[in-house]
Image (tube, helix red, strand yellow):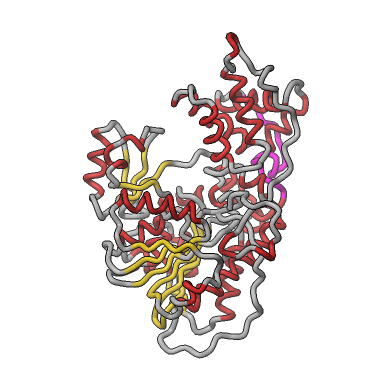
């Protein structure tokens, strides 16, 4: 369940066609969306001289596949590049940049392309080139078209932030996301990682928001660097690092990462605990947990126990009731805070998905709370910008658990050296926004269970309806 949205931490479109009633909230999945209209050129039409596809034809073919929205865009491109092994790193980068730019600006480009002729992909790519070259003139248009958002999401952003801030946020969501690293303190410190990266020609600057965060300049071949290969650092958005910091685990504790996915936050928790105690990394996807095992070997964490669950009622999870010092629920969500990285999410999600995700989040929270020992903490987090998945879930949980105490996020994070915008930690919550905080959009709250507790208020069983992780 890790990150997120309809394609993900976080809900890839696996198992389409299965009944919602037969899926657990820990295994949120995504229905395929109807293919995009517009014809891709056939392989024969896309051939250049000597029978090899031309660069333009390859871009059109890759875009046509992405616009079907049958899988997340990054998965589509990985498969496309495997099918075209002769493409070099620069060619792959050019194709990926073009495809992701069209996905970010799809609604605007589709509107502007109406007056032109030719295959849809060709028109969209021409507009993308014009924008990236600074030649695209955009007339006055409605908010949702100008910022390439579905109407339901545009309306939600304006209602939450007001028009002026919504415009700033929507502008930021159209930008390319930065590359952030977390220093793995089990193996190195920040200075050593920076020096190693610099020796490889990679510039990385510290970020004030998190003490182990670095932001990399440009698009280097990071995976080939000695620092990365040796497990000295992990790719992780600074906002995601703050979610793990909000758990604030201590050495020797028992921690449950209930939606662990491929383990980004799990690794951060393990490092904070100096590989002592135990981290139960739970997920319903065995492949994701397998990827986590590889990462664990590279980073040197020895206190993590991956746990593949059937659903949130799995007997192994029940055995952890009342034992956890801390539980992290990085819940499946719409992923609207990650649109810079996953622009196809906004075209693969609709308003109906939000309601199903809200039900799934409540089911997971209902399963998570009993795991926390008296005096322990529960952190609920999403990478969503929507009130239904954030503030309204806080109100729902606190109504059911009036004795649980909301611990101010700023207090916990600043004690660890985090320097944050006051607006990001208002009301005791953590709310990160791309245009204001430079990270992906994240939301989190930390509750602490009282040492002496009365029975929680009665609740109706949450719907097991499920959707994509975020």
Residue 388: in sight, yes or no?
no
Q: Is residue 256 left or right of residue 138?
A: left
Q: How many marks?
A: 0
Check if residue 144 falls in the magenta segment.
yes
Q: Nearer the viewer, residue 381 or 77?
A: 77
Is 401 rendered above or below residue 47?
below
Could you tell me residue 96's position as x and y percent? 53, 31
Residue 409: in sight, yes or no?
yes
**Residue range highlighted in magenta:** 136-151
- Residue 19: image quadrant is bottom right
Q: Give me the residue at 35% from left, 59% from top.
A: 418
Could you tell me residue 14's position as x and y percent? 61, 50
- Residue 413: image quadrant is bottom left
Could you tell me residue 109's position as x and y percent? 68, 32
Q: Give me the residue at 59% from left, 73% from top.
A: 395
Check if residue 15 falls in the magenta segment.
no
Is 181 rendered above or below residue 122?
below
Q: Main secondary structure of the magenta part?
A: loop
Q: Nearer the viewer, residue 266 or 52?
A: 52
**Image quadrant where one finds the C terminus:** bottom right
Is 81 rendered above or below residue 363?
above
Q: Is residue 180 left or right of residue 39?
A: left
- Residue 218: image quadrant is top left
Q: Give me the residue at 30% from left, 41% from top.
A: 229
Could you tell me residue 254's position as x and y percent? 35, 72
């Amino acid at each position: 369940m890790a990150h997120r949205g309809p394609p993900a931490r976080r809900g890839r479109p696996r198992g389409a066609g299965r009944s919602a009633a037969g899926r657990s909230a820990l295994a949120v999945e995504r229905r395929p969306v109807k293919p995009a209209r517009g014809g891709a050129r056939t392989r024969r039409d896309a051939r250049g001289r000597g029978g090899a596809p031309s660069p333009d034809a390859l871009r059109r073919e890759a875009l046509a596949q992405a616009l079907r929205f049958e899988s997340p865009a990054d998965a589509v491109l990985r498969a496309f590049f495997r099918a075209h092994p002769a493409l070099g790193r620069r060619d792959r980068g050019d194709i990926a940049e073009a495809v992701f730019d069209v996905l970010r600006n799809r609604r605007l480009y589709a509107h502007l392309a109406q007056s032109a002729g030719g295959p849809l992909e060709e028109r969209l790519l021409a507009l993308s080139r014009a924008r990236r070259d600074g030649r695209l003139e955009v007339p006055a248009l409605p908010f949702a078209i100008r910022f390439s958002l579905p109407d339901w999401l545009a309306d939600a952003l304006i209602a939450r932030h007001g028009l002026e801030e919504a415009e700033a946020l929507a502008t930021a969501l159209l930008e390319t996301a930065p590359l952030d690293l977390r220093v793995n303190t089990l193996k190195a410190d920040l200075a050593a990682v920076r020096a190693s990266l610099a020796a490889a020609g990679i510039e990385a600057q510290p970020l004030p928001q998190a003490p182990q965060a670095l932001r990399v300049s440009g698009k280097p071949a990071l995976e080939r660097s000695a620092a990365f290969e040796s497990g000295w650092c992990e790719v992780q958005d600074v906002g995601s690092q703050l979610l793990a910091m909000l758990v604030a685990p201590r050495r020797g504790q028992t921690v449950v990462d209930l939606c662990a996915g491929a383990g980004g936050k799990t690794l951060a928790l393990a490092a904070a605990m100096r590989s002592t105690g135990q981290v139960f990394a739970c997920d319903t996807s065995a492949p994701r947990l397998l990827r986590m095992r590889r990462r664990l070997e590279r980073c040197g964490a020895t206190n993590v126990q991956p746990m593949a669950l059937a659903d949130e009622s799995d007997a192994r999870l029940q055995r952890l009731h009342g034992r956890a010092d801390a539980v992290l629920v990085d819940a499946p969500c719409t992923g609207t805070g990650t649109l810079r990285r996953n622009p196809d999410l906004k075209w693969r999600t609709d308003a109906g998905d939000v309601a199903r995700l809200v039900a799934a989040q409540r089911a997971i929270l209902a399963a998570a709370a009993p795991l926390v020992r008296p005096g322990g903490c529960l952190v609920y987090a999403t990478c969503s910008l929507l009130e239904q998945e954030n503030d309204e879930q806080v109100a729902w949980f606190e109504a059911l658990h009036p004795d649980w105490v909301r611990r101010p996020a700023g207090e916990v994070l600043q004690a660890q050296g985090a320097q944050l915008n006051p607006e990001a930690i208002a009301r005791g919550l953590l709310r990160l926004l791309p245009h204001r905080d430079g990270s992906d959009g994240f939301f989190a709250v930390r509750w602490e269970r009282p040492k002496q507790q009365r029975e929680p208020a009665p609740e109706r069983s949450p719907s097991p309806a499920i959707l994509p992780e975020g």
